[in-house]
Image: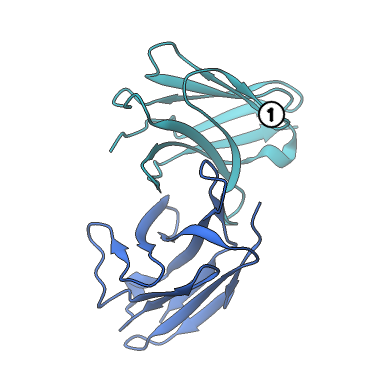
Amino acid sequence: SAVISQKPSRDICQRGTSLTIQCQVDSQVTMMFWYRQQPGQSLTLIATANQGSEATYESGFVIDKFPISRPNLTFSTLTVSNMSPEDSSIYLCSVVPSGAYNEQFFGPGTRLTVL
Amino acid sequence: DAKTTQPPSMDCAEGRAANLPCNHSTISGNEYVYWYRQIHSQGPQYIIHGLKNNETNEMASLIITEDRKSSTLILPHATLRDTAVYYCIVRTRNQFYFGTGTSLTVIP
């Protein structure tokens, strides 16, 4: 399995500001993903973080709002830009470990509240 | 993308088997069925996955119908710690698309 950490674990932010969430994995992984879970809802895939190239976004999510970086095989960041209260959610990173294509592991999540 | 349908909630008595159904009638031949659970807004935890055959591990069993249009997750002896939201997911290429899940409550 892969051990995934996210920073910060939670934050309270003012509307109009931006927050960058970090995802660190203890081993190299082939794929990394970012999800959003709004209060009381299921998980929604935001994008696939591609190493060394632009992320692949799902319908309804755009790079200007959710810029993503993935500089190497163990680290990625998601920025929530120009935040509004509707962005209050849990943001989760998930990974597919190298050599374990059929497995996907999730981080503990970052709980974001926008006032 | 194949969609999944699950009952929104279920109860199960502690010590009894919990049988959680999932419909995935639009599944393609090479798509896997995965089950995850989420306890109180923690990150989802992997339980089991399968393609065609029934699967069993230390946590659960997965029964997939012959036509692959539905499956059942079985927790053989449910405990209070199994209270969680259980998600049935059809894996499309590398992406997981979550449905609404089943909220399982294990009753003492």
Q: Give the percent coordinates (x, y) of residue B88.
A: 47, 35
Q: Colour of chain B?
A: cyan
Residue at 37 percent across and 77 percent down: it is: A80
Q: Among the chains, which one is blue?
A: A
- Relative depth, front residue between B17 and A78: A78
> Which chain is indicated by disc 1?
B
Q: Give the percent coordinates (x, y) of residue B97.
A: 37, 45
Q: Quadrant of the C terminus of chain B?
A: top right
Instruction: Indicate left or right for A55 with B49 as reference.
Output: left
Q: Quadrant of the N terminus of chain B?
A: top left
Q: Give the percent coordinates (x, y) of residue A97.
A: 56, 53
- Relative depth, front residue between B23 and B54: B54
Residue at 54 percent across and 59 percent down: it is: A29
Residue A37 visible somewhere in the drawing? no
A77 relative to A2, above or below: below
| Amino acid on which disc 1 is placed | Asn
Q: Which residue is mark 1?
A: B57
A19 relative to B37, above or below: below
Callout 1 secondary element: loop
B37 relative to A28, above or below: above
User: In which quarter of the view is residue B25 placed?
Assistant: top left
